[in-house]
Amino acid sequence: MTVHPPLEQIPADILAAADYEDRAAQHIPPPTLAWLAGGSGTEQTLRANREAFITVRITPRLLNNFQTASTCQSLCGTSLEHPILLAPVGHQQLLHTEAERAVARAADATGTCMVASTLSSLPLEDVCAATAASKWFQLYWQPRREDTLRLLSRAEAAGYQAIVLTLDTPVQALSRRAHIAGFRLPSDTPPNLAECKPLPQRALAPGQSILLHGMMSEAPDWDDLEWLVTQTRLPVLAKGVSHPADAVRLKTLGVAGQIVSNHGGRSLDGVPASLHCLAAVREAVGGNYPLLLDSGIRSGTDVFKALALGADAVLIGRLQGYALATAGALGVAHMLKLLREELEVCMALAGTPTLSDINPGCLMGD
């Protein structure tokens, strides 16, 4: 199949945000597409994330007044025009030559909060400078605390407004689809990690596992999290939450918000869909606490369903990558515009003028 370069205009056949998924196959080499589209293991969780949204049904209400309708809110001190954020997606130069700079321009044009990845193709300072819109920095814990602290300090100095600490992938599960397709990540060290140093190789005792006793010895624990929260003036959100008990403990330790996520089906395969974990986590942390969701969202109606089940906002990952590869900054901005319009149509037809009107009562019971 011929792979075409990114377009300089919006394709006429893109009528919904989800259309970018099919279109992207024309613009992404097959091995890279397998990396972007695939999940871990046999992709049970990847499929479950999408199927969860299909099973949720909305019950419309009639004759509500929309004179003061709004999609605005504030989360962790960040003012949002709408509840749709751009999730952290690493290695974006695999999808477009302008990489995260193009996504940042799209965020700027649409008033969208962007979450820049530790594994971005460009330095975090360059990504931040490319948009005047709100921006958060996604942090991967580094084996040396001083390296983690250096990333925190750089994010603060650059002007990021919050830190998103990813916790659900201390080791990366195998993507069989990407492996079979022959995909390999770039061999170059991501620019944000150029100054980070690995720990000396740990000597293992006879019978010890290189993964359980070696690699996992570098993963953060609860003490590390408690330390991290005290090292920055920025709010820290935890990404990768699915269990209510973890959610309660994270809140108790001072985490400012949480993201219910299974890494888009890229962490442990066979876990429940993020959407199915959402209501229990919301109940555990209470109503007045920032809670977001990612994994599986393809439409504004999906956004509505996530909000109804307890999310304050959502993050968009794969659709971002598909739109970037298809038409660069213009594609990402158009995808966000479509998602927002789809959400607003859903709000109008469901009879919910504001985000606070979207609640479990908007959904049909079993």
Image: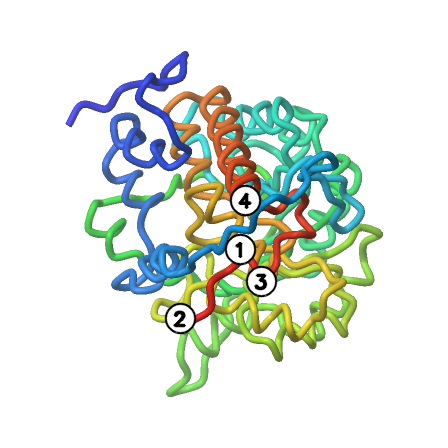
Q: Hey, which residue is sitting farthest left in the picture?
A: 1
Mark 4 and mark 3 lie on one chain; the one further toward the N terminus is 4
Looking at the rendered image, the quarter that the C terminus falls into is bottom left
The residue at which mark 1 appears reads as: 306
- Taking the spot 44% from the left edge, 42% from the top edge, the residue there is 299
Q: Quadrant of residue 281?
A: bottom right
In this rendering, position of residue 332 left or right of residue 236: left
Q: Which amino acid does the dot numbered 1 rest on? A: Ala
The residue at which mark 3 appears reads as: 361
Specify whether residue 141 is in view.
no
Q: Which amino acid does the dot numbered 3 rest on? A: Gly
x and y percentages locating residue 248 in the rendered image: 68, 76
Cβ atoms under marks 4 and 2 closer than 8 Å: no
Q: Hey, which residue is sitting farthest bottom in the picture?
A: 207
Q: Decide: few, some or many residues near mark 3? Use Cα within 10 Å; few <14, some 14-19, many ≥20.
A: few
Q: CA distance from mark 2 to mark 1?
A: 18 Å
- Taking the spot 56% from the left edge, 39% from the top edge, the residue there is 348
The residue at which mark 4 appears reads as: 87
x and y percentages locating residue 270 in the rendered image: 34, 70
The secondary element bearing badge 3 is classed as: helix
User: On residue 271, which mark appears?
Assistant: 2
Q: Decide: few, some or many residues near mark 2? Use Cα within 10 Å; few <14, some 14-19, many ≥20.
A: some
